[in-house]
Image (tube, rainbow, N blue to C red):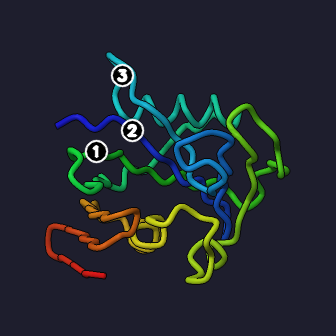
Amino acid sequence: MMLPYTICFIKRGNEILLLNRNKSPLMGMWNGVGGKVEKEETHEQCVIREVEEETGITLSHVDYKGTITWNVDDSPLSGMYAYLANVPETFSYDTPIQTREGVLEWKDISWILHQENKGVVSNIKYFLPYMLRDNKLYTYHLVYKQDQIKQFTANEKDYMHKANY
């Protein structure tokens, strides 16, 4: 099954470049950078194109980290291909920057993952720690009921973690 979206987390030291979206979906929430996979485009081509369009950053290398899928109430499965891009700590990119898509800003990883942080897209704190921890590929799945995450699963070849909420 081809997933419709991509997402990229650009990491510089202990910070990640996030976008606070101007429009729905997820308006006013901090999220990674990404978008819709176009016809005749691979998901890697899509994520590199979307990062350049939304940030002006041209990435020469991205690390594929797996897929993130979800079910919302009774709607069909949807999802995205997840990428991590590491840039050197010396990488110069001053923020905040106002763009057509929203505001870009470097955010400390501990701030992004803080349990009290309500301004970051809610599913990030579930899968981002796995993406940052190792170079393994995971398949992540979330089940939402009435806008709440009720289940999260992370599958890797030799590992599975499932939690109900």
CA gap between label 2 and label 1 equals 9 Å
Q: Secondary structure at mark 1?
A: strand
Q: In screen coordinates, is 60 left or right of 66? A: right
Q: Residue at x 61, y 59 (%)?
A: 11
Q: Secondary structure at mark 2?
A: strand
Q: Residue at x 20, y 44 (%)?
A: 76
Query: Which corner quadrant holds the C terminus?
Result: bottom left
2 or 1: mark nearer the eye = 1
What is the number of the mark on residue 5?
2
Using a 10 Å C-alpha cutoff, classify the residue at mark 3 as few (fewer than 14 neighbours), some (14 to 19) or many (20 or more).
Answer: few
> Do the residues bearing badges 2 and 1 touch, measured as CB atoms within 8 Å?
yes
Pointer 3: what residue? Answer: 41
Residue type beneath disc 1? Ser
* Residue type at numbered disc 2: Tyr
Left or right position of 58 against 149: right
**How many other residues sit within 10 Å of disc 1, few (<14), some (14-19) or many (≥20)?**
some
Residue 126 place in picture, x, y as percent: 41, 72
Reading the image, the residue beneath label 1 is: 78
Dot 3 amino acid type: Glu
Q: Position of residue 19 (x, y in %)?
A: 66, 49
In front: mark 3 or mark 2?
2
Q: Is residue 51 above or below residue 75?
A: above
**Element type at marker 3?**
loop
Residue that appears at 64% across and 53% down: 87
Q: Position of residue 162 (x, y in %)?
A: 21, 78
Cα gap from disc 3 to disc 2, whole angstroms: 12 Å
- Which residue is at the front of the view, 88 or 97? 97
As measured in the structure, the alpha-carbon distance from the residue carrying label 1 to the one carrying label 3 is 18 Å
Residue 15 marker:
none
